Image (tube, helix red, strand yellow):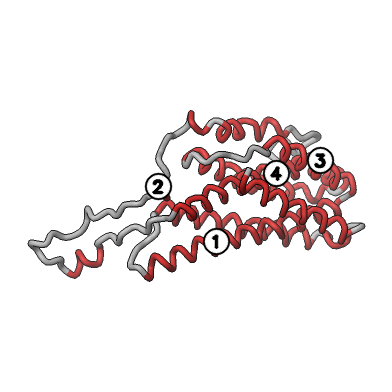
Amino acid sequence: MLARTSLAASFRPTAAITPVVLDFLAPSTLQQSRRLYHLTTTDHSTAPSSSSPPSPTNRHDARKPRYALTAKQREFLDSALRVNQAGELAATLIYTAQTPQVVRSHPHLRPLMKHMYDQEVGHFNTFNQLIAKHRVRPTAMYPVWYAAATFLGWSTGVLGREAAMACTEAVETEIGSHYNDQVREILSWKAEAERRGEELDPELEEMLANFRRIRDEELEHLDHAVENDAKEAKPYDPLVNFIRYGCKAAIKISEKV
């Protein structure tokens, strides 16, 4: 889970993360494309003219009307992107703080830790790009989550491999459930669009695919944690419950703030 050079003796989170952070902190300086998932008009440019009946081929190829999102649905997407970006930032910081301590005592875990870290960096980059592209306000709690995630990673790393894996299990349990909720919500929009003979904007379809992919990778991390004795952490229940409640609170706060 670490950058290519950072799994040696020491970890340097700033080098891997700071340039990415600057992207979403100043979205107005990046690509100023409008939010394509906010489309509220229907594109009839491919509709056949009334003077010539459409052939079967034209009828098949004709673009369906686009599903127009309501203000509440647009607000949901803004909130989802804001929370997801904050969560992926926290994940990179947790692994950055954990890894040196874990691999010092268990060097065989170096490839696994690097793999999970690299995936989290990819997730973080994805949401940075989406935050900037759609001009979504990032959470104002960024400095707080930065400090909290770093401390959580460091403290569970100090407690040992089992505690570090229990931390991953707890975080990914909540994050996986959160992504599932987002996927189900967007799928409900897709089902409604199909009932109305409409289709989702391609950019929203791509966003849905990204949410699914990232959810599956997060749940893969949960499986890795359990396979590496997460449940052997002591004290397991208080530690996992504390982290899970903390994640739930952070999600709720980041949705609004």
Q: Does dot 2 land on a helix, a strand or a loop?
A: helix
Q: Amino acid at mark 3?
A: Phe
Tell which tag, 2 or 3, sits nearer the viewer.
2
Packing grade of label 2 (10 A; few <14, some 14-19, many >=20) is: few
Circles 4, 3 touching at the beta carbon (< 8 Å) = no
In this figure, which residue is indicated by the disc labeled 3? 151
What's the residue at 62%, 40% (across, down)? 139
Give whichever of discs 2 and 3 has the lower sequence position: 2
Q: Amino acid at mark 1?
A: Val
Determine the CA span between mark 2 and mark 3. Answer: 38 Å
Question: First in sequence: mark 1 or mark 3?
Answer: 3
Q: Secondary structure at mark 4?
A: helix
Q: Which residue is mark 1?
A: 183
Kind of residue at badge 4:
Ala
What residue is shown with label 4?
A: 90
For this view, does 250 lie left or right of residue 51?
Answer: right
Which circle's residue, 4 or 1, is located before the other in the chain?
Answer: 4
Mark 3: which secondary structure? helix
Q: Is residue 50 above or below residue 13?
A: below
Check residue 36 in the rendering and tell me which mark sits there, or answer none.
2
**Hey, which quadrant is residue 244 in on the image?**
bottom right
Which of the marked residues, 2 or 1, is nearer the chain's N terminus? 2
